[in-house]
Amino acid sequence: MNKIEDLDLNGVYTYADYLKWAFDETVEIIKGRVFKMSPAPNLKHQRVSLNLTLEFGNFFKKTPCHLFAAPFDVRLTRSKKSNSDKIYTVVQPDLCVICDDEKLDEQGCVGAPDLIIEILSPGNTQKEMKDKFEVYQENGVKEYWLVEPNDKAVFVYVLNDKGKYIGLQPFTEDDFISSTIFPELSISLKEVFAE
């Protein structure tokens, strides 16, 4: 199968299916459903991504944690409600931090990264804000950042002890942002959103 159009987009797919595909387009699977990734990110998205990568890279090179940027497959395990061992979610976050080497293999990451950052682009907002939010929460991603380049804002969600995300006050361009799970990390959003 070489064209995404050959798929039944109402079908349910697994990581095993994903490995067989040779599409020109990049796709993700969220809870078994196939999603085309947006076309190449725009300039603003790429600048923000690079700035965050530089800031995070400088911080995490001095720690046992690892920073990865898309394309990088994150395979999230089954829902606690399911009795299947099949993986129905494969995503490619813009950035993710993984502190447990046991989760890393040659194909990427199996299980929840500690922190995921998604940068919003036209066309992917619903997927990042609803579908991925739910799957990241369900799989135990401790901290999830949604970055809105057009509004120069970052929305941070932190997993509480009940496994639900709590939203923090939004961070804007004039703020320094730090992570709740990596409190020593402090980044100037003016630098992140610099053009």
Image (cartoon, rainbow, N blue to C red):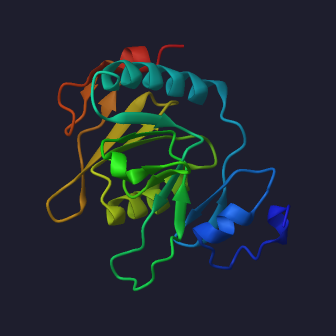
Please tell me which residue is depicted at 31% across the width and 47% down the height of the picture: 100
Q: Please tell me which residue is depicted at 73% across the width and 65% down the height of the picture.
A: 20
Q: Nearer the viewer, residue 131 or 143?
A: 143
Task: Spot the residue most to the left.
Answer: 161
Q: Please indicate whether residue 16 sits to the left or right of residue 185 in the image.
A: right
| Residue 96, image quadrant | top left
**Can you say which quadrant of the picture contains the N terminus?**
bottom right
In the rendered view, does 173 fall on the left or right side of 51? left
Q: Position of residue 141 (x, y in %)?
A: 32, 54
- The relative height of residue 110 versus residue 138 in the rendered view (above or below) is above
Say which quadrant the C terminus sits in.
Answer: top right
Residue 37 drawn at (x, y percent):
66, 50
* Residue occupying image coordinates x 44% and y 27%: 152
When asked about the image quadrant of residue 4, the answer is: bottom right
Q: Residue 34 versus residue 110: which sits nearer the camera?
A: 110
Q: Position of residue 42 (x, y in %)?
A: 66, 30
Q: Residue at x 38, y 35 (%)?
A: 66
Q: Position of residue 58 (x, y in %)?
A: 36, 18
Q: Is residue 144 visible?
A: no
Specify whether residue 83 is in view. yes
Number of disc labels: 0
Q: Is residue 22 left or right of residue 46?
A: right
